[in-house]
Image: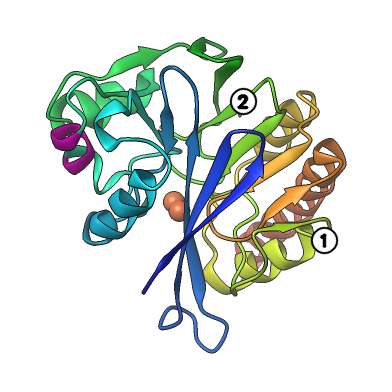
């Protein structure tokens, strides 16, 4: 396995590791994003067992010991499995996450106390970069779920939203909604809930110009339109789940 590095927006680096054994024949990518600033931030630690690959990739961009912030979508192995490995090699680094994630998992699981972020709170990274944390409970899964928006470049770090199979390009202007629905139908990774579309439309209001997908290519273009289309698809899925419930109770 190798971890490839691509700059997908000014000062934002995608570290991508393709695993052909997952969901063959298409395979599956795991992506972390490094935001360069006076206080560099890594979004997704990667799996614990992939730590050497991701550490060596980060080291090609900045000295690993200078990493300041470790953030991720929610508490799962691919999002934060290597959290403590990063804390060990970056002595000034701190995990930053929403209140639910900190209270439920991170206050206990992180080797140093995390910074608790309120919904909408901003971390100034310096060098023009600033990230806003946004709570997205149960979207696509995990009650601690959240995303981050880097506001200088308009890059939304989507976590598992828009998850797709395959090893596409680092950056695409093509469709990211259709492939996400294919992966949804295969994996059923989302916790379908009545407010899911509302949560996704709230992200659309930030009008991102780049969508940084954890599993898939990054998307350059009208992020609000892509999020709006994703919200509509999830509305349809949630409605058909409701119909299935109604049919099962009527039977
Ligand atoms: Fe996940
Ligand atoms: Fe993930």
Q: Secondary structure at mark 2?
A: strand
Please give the name of the residue rendered at 58% of the width and 37% of the height, measured from the top-left corner. 12
Q: Main secondary structure of the magenta part?
A: helix
Query: The N terminus lies in which quarter of the figure?
Result: bottom left
Give the CA distance from mark 2 to mark 1: 22 Å
The residue at which mark 1 appears reads as: 175
Please give the name of the residue rendered at 33% of the width and 45% of the height, measured from the top-left corner. 59
Number of the label disc, if any, that sits on residue 150: 2
Q: Position of residue 11 (x, y in %)?
A: 59, 33
Image-quadrant location for residue 154:
top right
From the viewer's side, name the closer residue of 163 and 144. 163
User: Relative to 75, is 30 on the left or the right?
Assistant: right
Mark positioned earlier in the residue sequence (2 or 1): 2
Query: The C terminus lies in which quarter of the figure?
Result: bottom right
Is disc 2 surrounded by few (<14), some (14 to 19) or many (20+) residues within 10 Å? Answer: many
Please give the name of the residue rendered at 78% of the width and 47% of the height, measured from the top-left corner. 220
Q: Position of residue 167 (x, y in %)?
A: 59, 73
From the viewer's side, name the closer residue of 159 and 61. 61
**Which residue is at the far bottom?**
25
The answer to whether one can see residue 143 in this image is: no
Magenta stretch holds residue 79 = no
Q: Is residue 49 above or below residue 115?
A: below
Q: In this rendering, which labeled residue sits more in front, label 2 or label 1?
A: 2
**Which residues make up the magenta segment?**
85-89
The answer to whether one can see residue 14 in this image is: yes
Is disc 1 surrounded by few (<14), some (14 to 19) or many (20+) residues within 10 Å? Answer: few
Number of the label disc, if any, that sits on residue 73: none
Q: Secondary structure at mark 1?
A: loop
Q: Position of residue 165 (x, y in %)?
A: 59, 71
Colour mapping: rainbow
Q: Position of residue 195 (x, y in %)?
A: 66, 34
């Amino acid at each position: 396995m190798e971890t490839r590095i691509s700059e997908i927006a000014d000062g934002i680096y995608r570290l991508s590791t393709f695993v052909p054994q997952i969901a063959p024949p298409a395979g599956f990518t795991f992506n972390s994003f490094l935001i360069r600033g006076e206080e560099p931030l890594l979004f997704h630690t990667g799996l614990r067992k992939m730590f050497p690959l991701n550490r060596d990739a980060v080291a090609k961009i900045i000295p690993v010991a200078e990493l300041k912030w470790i953030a991720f979508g929610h508490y799962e192995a691919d999002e934060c499995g290597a959290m403590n490995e990063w804390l060990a090699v970056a002595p000034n680094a701190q995990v930053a996450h929403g209140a639910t994630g900190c209270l439920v998992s991170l206050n206990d699981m992180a080797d140093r106390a995390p910074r608790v972020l309120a919904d909408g709170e901003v971390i100034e990274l310096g060098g023009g970069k600033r990230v806003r944390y946004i709570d997205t409970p149960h979207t696509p899964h995990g009650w601690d779920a959240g995303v981050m928006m880097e506001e200088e470049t308009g890059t939304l770090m989507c976590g598992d939203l828009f998850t797709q199979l395959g090893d596409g390009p680092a950056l695409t202007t093509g469709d990211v909604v259709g492939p996400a629905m294919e992966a949804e139908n295969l994996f059923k990774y989302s916790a379908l809930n009545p407010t899911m579309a509302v949560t996704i439309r709230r992200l659309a209001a930030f009008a991102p110009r780049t969508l940084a997908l954890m599993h898939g290519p990054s998307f350059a273009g009208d992020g609000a339109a892509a999020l709006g289309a994703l919200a509509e698809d999830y509305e349809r899925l949630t409605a058909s789940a409701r119909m299935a419930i109604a049919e099962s109770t009527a039977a």
